[in-house]
Image (cartoon, rainbow, N blue to C red):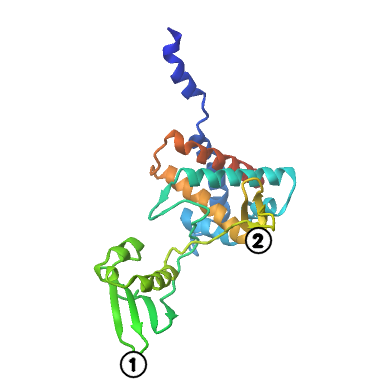
Amino acid sequence: MASIYLQEWINKSELDYYTMFVKAWIPFNAWYMDNFYDEVIPRTTDRKIIDFIKDNSNRYRDKIISLLRSNDEHSNEFKMLLSNLHFELERHPIPNEDERISFNNTNLNRNNLPSHVVSFRHHDYKVEFRHTQPRTTKRWICQIISKRGTNNTIHYIDLFNWSLKELHENPSYIAIPNDKKQYLDACFAEMNPKKPEIIILNPTTNSQGVYIQPSSSIEIDKNKNLYFINNYELVSRVIIEILYDLRCKLFHGELHPISANLGIYKYAYQIQNILIKELI
């Protein structure tokens, strides 16, 4: 008879890392509102304060950098948690607006590049964002220009938004010869307003084909060949942004709280729990 309750008791035995992550965020929230909230600048929203924390020295960010730099037991535990969080995010993608939350794909600041040109052989591949035009118009202009003769535009595409999907589905893009599409795509990628920061480095191999740590890198998980670029400030900014993105998913009710996502918040909670102790 008691066996009919077995599954429910098993479910109850699992830690609720969603709630635990929220509880670990609350003291951090209180700390940054007390220290960095400013009505004069103004810096009054969570987003603006988090951006300030990412970009300036403070106890929270400095602790991340210290843990990344060191190689003691405490630091190695922190790096292992980062590794676990990274691989959980890869196994169970959580979308964030148009992009997923990932160490492979984190945007820190808007890319305000107005235009970009890629030149190859007899053609210029140009993408332009005409930000002064009304939002209701097609402000993204893509052109392939022939450099022979009078610099004629031989292919022209206009879009409402920066979107690879929208670009690739456009009839004018489909009509472009395949050998030219790669150069237009490369140019378009450089104009991505949410161009991601790349912090993960692929391992190199020695003469025996064994994976080894790439030069100028931070070793995060040797067993899983996970290495970050040797830029502690940038890596710390990415970590803070990912934790904040995960926070927003919970606070805004945008996350489906299924068991598959629980591992993500388990490691996010454990990382956050280490960092908030620095604030006492």
| Image: 193 above or below 256 | below
**Which image quadrant: the C terminus?**
top right
Distance between the Cα atoms at labels 1 and 2?
47 Å
Marks counted in the figure total 2
Q: Is residue 252 left or right of residue 59?
A: left
Instruction: Report x, y in % for residue 115.
Output: 40, 77
Q: Amino acid at mark 2?
A: Asn
Instruction: Report x, y in % for residue 47.
Output: 47, 56
Quadrant hosting residue 214: bottom right
Residue 174 is labelled as none
Residue 47: tell me if it is visible: yes
Q: Nearer the viewer, mark 1 or mark 2?
A: 1
Specify few, some or many for label 2: CA neighbours under 10 Å numbering under 14, 14-19, or 20 or more: some
Which residue is under mark 1?
149
| Farthest-out residue, bottom | 149
Q: Are marks 1 and 2 in contact (CB under 8 Å)?
A: no
Specify few, some or many for label 1: CA neighbours under 10 Å numbering under 14, 14-19, or 20 or more: few
Which residue is under mark 2?
230
Q: Going from the N terminus, do you reach mark 1 or mark 2 first? A: 1
- The structure residue drawn at horizontal position 41% and vertical position 49%, both measured from the top left corner, is 95
Residue 44: tell me if it is visible: no
| Front-most of residues 21 and 6 | 6
Q: Amino acid at mark 1?
A: Gly
| Image: 17 above or below 179 | above
- The structure residue drawn at horizontal position 38% and vertical position 44%, both measured from the top left corner, is 254
Instruction: Report x, y in % for residue 39.
Output: 48, 60
